[in-house]
């Protein structure tokens, strides 16, 4: 990242003088003066590879063009971004990519969202002069979360970098060479055979449709069209702060009411909120933490609501599984509750209920299919679609999203607190847990519910809270699996002197999950995150245990947190996964 | 101490001569000498490459310096009985000049060697590469000793004064590179020797490594002292097992003798070497890919800057030079910069080793002063074109280079003139072509090579070379289109301009140079569906003329059953079935089959 403490250098770009720190790239310097240089393999979150060669520019005195995304500025440099040589080369480079790409843009899931398509239009490719061999490779559709279509890959290696640099997993690598090059898991294996967490960050950075979420929208349409089915939907906390972007709204725009309205118009019988289930998770997880502290259980306890993180532990660090909270994720608590408590209450045959969840996440598709998640007697969650799939469905339903009125969730499982809402940002689960655990443990009212130390985009955050009677609760929060691994290694080394650790697999938490609208960078993350806390502040209740619907649920049906019914329905076990590491 | 011998028999143990039988000749000679009780008076020495590989196995008998060629195991008895016992030269084993067919007894009288100035190759073929003593006997490690008495800055000045430029192809001034690495901040620095020689037909570096490994160790140690490094890597392709074996042996000897390791020559300078075997990817000759490979990562280049001098191996300042560059260093240090600087041209000093291959009489390795013309190399050293054919082109610089036509044969060879002509110095491969070589096919051959060796990282090289190759294939098959030539030129410009590393940036050169000098051949393929050289199988055909006597030999020879005809009647070739292999023409005793 560019550091403004580096001494400035002066250069000209297209005749304009510009003065920028010496560690700026030409691309960054050009941006400062409003000169747009087309680029493709470059991604603001990732290291710079300079491999696509779309961003080439002419540098006075250089024999060949240089890639502006990697080439650093220097004093006296004279850059030209718009010469015949540059324009022609840029166009040829994109034409070469297209010559080895299926020409099915009209039917492609990324149509109008594809960066290659947009670039081709931008630089004015009007024909492909090269007709020859194209890469032949099979699609990987063997897992429920991510579809990999190597024929659409342009080898930009963004997926390689995000998986390595952000997640530390190195699932993807380049294999073979030259024209036979292919980016994929080792030995040509499917993603389900290697240490993939299904976090979906690769689908979030892929410029084409080489990596996409598995599309389950047709299943939702089928369920909605079936008069025998009672279709309920839950929406995860972070969906409402991102969905609007798919309809041209600003990053982080809050569209909760319109989203609920859209879901009703699509035909869902009940529109519920995962926030409600997040409050349940806090009830269970908070009590579990206090129980572990009181009884000398395994500490630090770690959250288990991020399914990418759970896959990571089960695959790579099974020995730390005892640290994971046994509380189910909000999605799964919701699923089991809707087919038991809600079905009983509303006298609906649970066999007829189709439970749909809208998630910011691709790994949630995998989570819903875990064999153990049928405690209701049925599949607890039937269909999981991502925010992006929901946006597509709203468009397919010809709903004018911007013109929708704001509507409220249905009761009782649409009632929630600020604690449940902030689950979607890194640090949110921790903050919500602290709000509840403090009051449950001390019996005192919390004066200030804002635990700002655990908020924000810093990779690993630490804090401690005085719970009285000598208990100083030490906590840590990490997002991205690379940061998570650091804490896991600390536990393994016996140096993790914490009571509670929150882990989110995705950078920034669910607000930038693998199923969210793209493009995503830290500005987008910050905007979505701010909206999460804005919603929190506006809520009548901000502590999960104060949610009246939750109180009613426990009082009338569930019993006590960690009680017998809760233990049966709301807790689970994790087991090692055998995959190629 | 070994006893002095009255005669030395030098047998070439380079890869070329080993393949043609010197591995059997050496023990046979020793056995025969032992049987005669002469093992103390005559010493058999296995040397490195002499360069005249075409004529191997080579055997030189000293003190006379008689040069025997194509020696077979069955010649061993005669060499011992006639030459070593009776003192008579065996005429039938002497070298014959390709042009005059005269026998030449002495090594130094042979035209192949006369024009050469063997500087980097000075010891190759003359000393036993497995003996440290022989290297020291040839003034080895004197350059290092001298360097260690100087300041590192003075060593760099000496190299700069010599005018030595990188012999790997780029031609960057070596002294300047050393200076940059010395000036780079960092406690840990590395020296790397790029021995990943990969151009088709090139074997300069292999010969030096096999024939004079201590020279490379000495050159690298001097560099290490100059830039402030204590550790070096030799990145050598695993396809060079003999070079690796001799390097390992030499490194062990040097360590033992205090020429590597801690406190070299009893001073304060520490330097040690590792060998890293490369798996043979051409792109690993590119310095950033090479370093990635040493680090254990996939051998792919990264954009520069930063240059290795500032951020190289494991992010440390690193100086990378090619084998031949390092091979020049010991002598420059020993003799001073003056001699080296006196050779060559204004901008290109010293000598250059070339690997002569193709349609030339004397294939092999030749070291010549810069500034020599291509004509001198091909006709005087190389002995002209083989089989009495005519010269058409010479390909210089490997897959990154270009083809030069007859009109440029008098071009003095230096870095700048070759680049201006559309070729490049490259590492020194010279492939000579005659009138039977199709220039489109040559371009296709090299493009096929680069396309195959492209690492696949950047778009223009990965996708662009593939499309260029497809167009060239189409032209060679007679399916070329009028717009193919401008399309090739357009693609070439983009690939040259936009590729990430030198492999891609130079990959189009063979196409561009053939297009500029032999455009008519491309046009003949496209417009007339004709291959003027008669090389492109799809565009040639065989017909039987009325000289045919109906002997039926062609019919028997044809693998496709394309020839029919009654005995004693003129036969006919079915053009559709014919696979154009030319077997019929080769077998016809009456010259009755024409190729068109």
Image (cartoon, coloured by chain):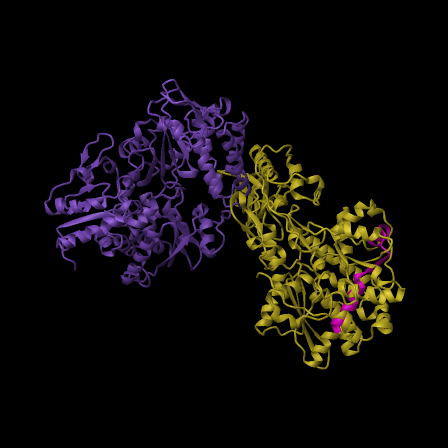
Chain colours: A yellow, B purple
Image-based side of B273 in relation to A93, left or right: left
- Residue in view at x 54 percent, y 30 percent: B487
| Quadrant the N terminus of chain A occupies | bottom right
As rendered, which of B455 and A192 lies closer to the eye? A192
Q: Residue furthest top?
A: B546
Q: Is residue A407 left or right of residue A477?
A: right
Q: Main secondary structure of the magenta part?
A: helix
- Find residue A332 and report its horizontal and vertical position in percent: 76, 64
Q: Can residue B596 be seen by looking at this rendering?
A: no
x and y percentages locating residue A525 in the rendered image: 70, 55
Question: In the image, is residue B540 above or below residue B320?
Answer: above
Q: Position of residue A307 (x, y in %)?
A: 69, 62
For the residue pair B312 and A113, the one nearer the viewer reads as: A113
**Residue A111 percent coordinates (x, y):** 71, 42
A269 relative to B484 in the view: left or right:
right
Q: Is residue B288 above or below residue A549?
A: above
Q: Which residues are magenta?
A: A259-286
Does the magenta portion include A267?
yes
As drawn, the residue found furthest toward the left would be: B86
Residue A431 makes an appearance in the image: yes
Q: Is residue A371 left or right of residue A21?
A: right
**Could you tell me which residue is drawn at 40 percent across and 27 percent down?**
B555
Image quadrant where residue A237 sits: bottom right
Q: Is B207 contained in the magenta span?
A: no
Tell how many labels.
0
Front residue of this view, candidates A423 and A191:
A191
The quadrant the C terminus of chain A occupies is bottom right
């Amino acid at each position: 990242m560019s550091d403004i403490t580096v001494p400035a250098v002066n250069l000209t770009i297209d005749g304009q003088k510009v003065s920028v720190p010496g560690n700026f790239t030409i691309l960054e310097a050009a941006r400062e003066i409003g000169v747009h240089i087309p680029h493709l393999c470059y991604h603001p979150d990732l290291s710079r590879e300079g491999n696509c060669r779309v961003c080439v520019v002419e540098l006075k005195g250089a024999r060949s063009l240089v890639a502006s995304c990697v080439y650093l500025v220097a004093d006296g440099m004279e850059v030209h971004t718009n010469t015949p040589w540059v324009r022609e080369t840029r166009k040829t480079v994109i034409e070469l990519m297209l010559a080895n790409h299926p020409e099915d843009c009209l039917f492609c899931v990324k149509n109008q969202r594809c960066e290659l398509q947009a670039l081709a239009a931008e630089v004015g490719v009007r024909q492909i002069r090269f007709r020859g061999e194209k890469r032949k490779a099979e699609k990987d559709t063997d897992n429920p979360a991510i579809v990999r279509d190597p024929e659409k890959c342009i080898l930009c290696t963004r997926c390689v970098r995000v998986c390595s640099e952000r997640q530390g997993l190195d699932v993807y690598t380049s294999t073979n060479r030259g024209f036979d090059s292919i980016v994929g898991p080792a030995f040509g294996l499917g993603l389900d055979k290697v240490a993939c967490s299904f976090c979906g960050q690769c689908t979030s950075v892929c410029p084409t449709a080489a990596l996409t979420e598995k599309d389950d929208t047709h299943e939702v349409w089928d369920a909605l069209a079936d008069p025998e089915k009672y279709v309920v939907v839950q929406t995860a906390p972070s969906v409402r702060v991102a969905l609007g972007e798919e309809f041209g709204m600003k990053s982080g725009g809050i569209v909760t009411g319109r989203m609920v309205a859209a879901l009703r118009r699509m035909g869902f019988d009940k529109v519920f909120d995962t926030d409600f289930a997040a409050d349940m998770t806090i009830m269970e997880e908070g009590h579990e933490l206090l129980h572990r502290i009181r009884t000398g259980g395994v500490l630090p306890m770690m959250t288990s609501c991020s399914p990418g993180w759970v896959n990571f532990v089960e695959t790579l660090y099974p020995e730390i599984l005892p640290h994971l909270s046994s509380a189910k994720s909000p999605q799964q608590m919701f699923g089991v509750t809707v087919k038991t408590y809600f079905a009983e209450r509303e006298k609906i045959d649970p066999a007829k209920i189709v439970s749909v969840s809208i998630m910011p996440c691709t790994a949630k598709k995998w989570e819903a299919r875990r064999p153990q998640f049928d405690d209701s007697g049925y599949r607890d969650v039937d269909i999981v679609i991502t925010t992006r799939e929901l946006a597509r469905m709203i468009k397919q339903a010809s709903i004018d999203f911007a013109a929708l009125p704001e509507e409220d969730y249905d009761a009782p499982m649409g009632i929630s607190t600020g604690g449940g809402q902030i689950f979607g940002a890194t640090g949110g689960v921790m903050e919500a847990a602290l709000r509840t655990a403090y009051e449950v443990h001390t019996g005192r009212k919390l004066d200030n519910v804002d635990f700002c130390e655990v908020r924000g985009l810093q990779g690993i955050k630490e804090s401690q809270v005085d719970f009285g009677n000598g208990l100083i609760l030490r906590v840590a929060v990490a997002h991205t699996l690379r940061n998570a691994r650091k804490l896991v290694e600390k536990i393994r080394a016996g140096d993790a002197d914490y009571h509670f650790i929150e882990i989110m697999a995705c950078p920034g938490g669910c607000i930038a999950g693998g199923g969210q609208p793209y493009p995503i960078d830290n500005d987008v993350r910050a905007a979505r995150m701010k909206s999460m806390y804005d919603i929190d502040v506006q809520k009548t209740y901000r502590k999960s245990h104060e949610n009246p619907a939750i109180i009613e649920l426990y009082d009338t049906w569930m019993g006590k947190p960690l009680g017998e019914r809760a233990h049966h329905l709301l807790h689970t076990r994790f087991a090692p996964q055998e995959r190629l590491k | 101490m070994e006893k002095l011998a009255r005669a030395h028999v030098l047998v070439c143990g380079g890869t070329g001569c080993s393949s043609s039988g010197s591995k059997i000749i050496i023990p046979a000679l020793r056995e025969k000498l032992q049987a005669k009780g002469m093992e103390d008076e005559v010493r058999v020495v296995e040397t490195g490459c002499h360069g005249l590989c075409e004529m191997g196995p080579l055997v030189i008998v000293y003190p006379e310096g008689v040069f025997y060629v194509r020696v077979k195991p069955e010649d061993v008895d005669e060499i011992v009985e006639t030459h070593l016992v009776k003192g008579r030269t065996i005429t039938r084993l002497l070298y014959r000049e390709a042009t005059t067919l005269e026998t030449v007894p002495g090594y130094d009288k042979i035209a192949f060697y006369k024009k050469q100035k063997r500087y980097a190759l000075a010891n190759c073929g003359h000393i036993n590469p497995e003996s440290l003593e022989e290297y020291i006997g040839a003034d080895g490690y004197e350059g290092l000793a001298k360097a260690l008495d100087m300041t590192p800055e003075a060593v760099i000045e000496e190299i700069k004064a010599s005018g030595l430029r990188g012999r790997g192809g780029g031609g960057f001034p070596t002294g300047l590179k050393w200076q940059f690495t010395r000036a780079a901040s960092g406690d840990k620095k590395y020296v790397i020797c790029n021995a990943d020689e990969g151009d088709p037909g090139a074997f300069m570096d292999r010969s030096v490594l096999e024939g004079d490994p201590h020279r490379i160790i000495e050159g690298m140690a001097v560099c290490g002292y100059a830039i402030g490094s204590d550790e070096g890597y030799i990145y050598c392709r695993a396809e060079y097992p003999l070079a690796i074996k001799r390097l390992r042996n030499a490194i062990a000897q040097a360590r033992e003798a205090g020429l590597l390791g801690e406190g070299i020559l009893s001073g304060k300078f520490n330097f040690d070497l590792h060998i890293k075997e490369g798996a043979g990817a051409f792109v690993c000759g590119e310095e950033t890919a090479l370093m990635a490979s040493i680090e254990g990562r996939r051998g792919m280049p990264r954009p520069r800057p930063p240059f290795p001098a500032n951020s190289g191996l494991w992010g440390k300042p690193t100086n990378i030079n090619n084998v031949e560059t390092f091979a020049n260093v010991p002598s420059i240090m020993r003799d001073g910069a003056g001699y080296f600087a006196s050779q060559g041209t204004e901008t290109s000093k010293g000598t250059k080793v070339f690997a002569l291959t193709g349609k030339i009489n004397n294939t092999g390795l030749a070291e010549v002063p810069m500034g020599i013309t291509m004509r001198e190399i091909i006709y005087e050293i190389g002995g002209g074109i083989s089989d009495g054919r005519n010269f058409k082109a010479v390909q210089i610089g490997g897959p990154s280079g270009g083809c030069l036509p007859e009109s440029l044969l008098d071009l003095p060879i230096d870095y700048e003139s070759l680049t201006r002509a559309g070729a490049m110095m490259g590492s020194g491969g010279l492939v000579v072509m005659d009138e039977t070589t199709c220039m489109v096919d040559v371009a296709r051959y090299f493009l096929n090579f680069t396309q195959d060796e492209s690492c696949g990282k950047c778009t223009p090289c990965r996708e662009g070379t593939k499309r260029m190759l497809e167009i060239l294939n189409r032209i060679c098959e007679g399916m070329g289109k009028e717009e193919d030539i401008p399309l090739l030129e357009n693609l070439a410009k983009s690939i040259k301009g936009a590729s990430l590393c030198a492999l891609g940036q130079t990959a189009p050169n063979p196409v561009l140079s053939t297009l500029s000098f032999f455009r008519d051949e491309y046009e003949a393929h496209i417009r007339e569906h004709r291959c003027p050289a008669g090389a492109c199988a799809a565009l040639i055909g065989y017909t039987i003329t009325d000289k045919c006597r109906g002997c039926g030999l062609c019919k028997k020879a044809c693998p496709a059953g394309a020839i029919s005809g009654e005995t004693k009647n003129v036969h006919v070739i079915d053009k559709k079935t014919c696979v154009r292999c030319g077997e019929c023409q080769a077998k016809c005793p009456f010259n009755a089959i024409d190729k068109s």
